[in-house]
């Protein structure tokens, strides 16, 4: 059975304090790893797709990386507006399996 | 461009009543997905359609749940009869053709409360 696990469940950072979120996956025939951001009362918003081990993608203060078993979302010098829940999802053919998410809180 | 539109945004009803959730996908998107999100189970896929045809409904929890897509611009998820354990946020998402790594785009969900 496909499984995606995210850690930590919650993370509190001071503004400017860099950190990383982890996404571990066990998926047969991975076709891509997705990262989404979800704000309260909203649907998940697409951030990145990673296709193969070693791949990296960046957007503003966020950088996503992928290995054969894990993906990391690195947040550099976060700001309060980066506070949200970050979800990763593994694609094994049209269907996404989501992790439980990491709730990030950045304090000014 | 308009995103995925869901209605209603909130629904509160009593146990046993029929509930219908609605979704308008992004124009030109050929895939439509229905998800349910709860604190306990996270985001779970219920069913998805390709070109208005249901492809996989293995995530639909029971026969009380049904989904239709009568045309490319509209889909419904119906619960009949509803139960308190159906309380959750229900999301609709759509994506275009062109490989299964095209990202899914989500609506803002319907928060359903069954009393």
Image (spheres, rainbow, N blue to C red):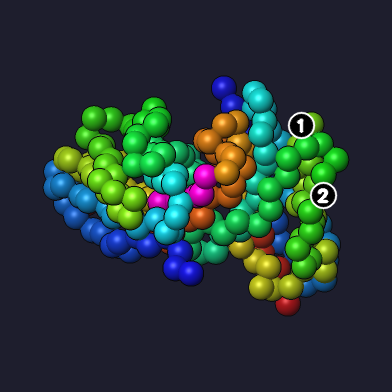
Image mark 2: chain? A
Q: Secondary structure at mark 1?
A: loop
Dot label at residue A56 = 2
Cα gap from disc 1 to disc 2, whole angstroms: 15 Å
Judge the density around disc 2: few (<14), some (14-19), many (≥20) Cα neighbours within 10 Å.
some
Dot label at residue A19 = none
How far across and how far down the image is residue B14, in percent?
16, 51
Q: Nearer the viewer, residue B86 or A38?
A: A38
Instruction: From the image, tell me which residue sits under label 1.
Output: A69
Left or right position of B79 against A107? left
Tell me the magenta residue range.
B92-97
How far across and how far down the image is residue B18, in percent?
16, 47
Q: Main secondary structure of the magenta part?
A: strand
Q: Is residue B35 magenta?
A: no
How far across and how far down the image is residue A11, in percent?
70, 56
Q: Disc 1 vs disc 2: which is toward the camera?
A: 2
Image mark 1: chain? A
Q: Residue furthest bottom?
A: A108
Q: Is residue B95 magenta?
A: yes
**Disc on the earlier residue, 1 or 2:** 2
Left or right position of A35 against B74? right
Q: Are marks 1 and 2 on the same chain?
A: yes
- Whether residue A9 is visible: no
Residue at 45%, 39% (x, y): give it.
Answer: B45
Q: Could you say which quadrant of the image residue B7 lies in?
A: bottom left
Residue at 63%, 37% (x, y): give it.
Answer: A90
Q: Does A37 appear above or below A26?
A: below
Q: Nearer the viewer, residue A80 or B1?
A: B1
Q: Nearer the viewer, residue A75 or B72?
A: B72
Q: Secondary structure at mark 2?
A: strand
């Amino acid at each position: 059975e496909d499984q995606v696990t995210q850690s930590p469940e919650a993370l509190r950072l001071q503004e400017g304090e860099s950190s990383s979120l982890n996404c571990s996956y066990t998926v047969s025939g991975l076709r891509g790893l997705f990262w989404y951001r979800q704000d309260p009362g909203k649907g998940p918003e697409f951030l990145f797709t990673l296709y193969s081990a070693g791949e990296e993608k960046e957007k503003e203060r966020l950088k996503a990386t992928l290995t054969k078993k894990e993906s990391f979302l690195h947040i550099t010098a976060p700001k309060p507006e980066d506070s949200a829940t970050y979800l990763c999802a593994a694609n094994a053919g049209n269907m996404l399996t989501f992790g439980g998410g990491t709730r990030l809180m950045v304090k000014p | 461009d308009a995103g995925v539109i869901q209605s209603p945004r909130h629904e509160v009803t009593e146990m046993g009543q029929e509930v219908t959730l609605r979704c308008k996908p992004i124009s030109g998107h050929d895939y439509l997905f229905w998800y349910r999100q709860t604190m306990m189970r996270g985001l779970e896929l219920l069913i998805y359609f390709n070109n208005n045809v249901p492809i996989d409904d293995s995530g639909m929890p029971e026969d009380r749940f049904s989904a239709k897509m009568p045309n490319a611009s509209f889909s419904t998820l119906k619960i009949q009869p509803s139960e308190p354990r159906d309380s959750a946020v229900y999301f609709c998402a759509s994506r275009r053709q062109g490989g299964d790594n095209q990202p899914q785009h989500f609506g803002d969900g319907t928060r359903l409360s069954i009393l």
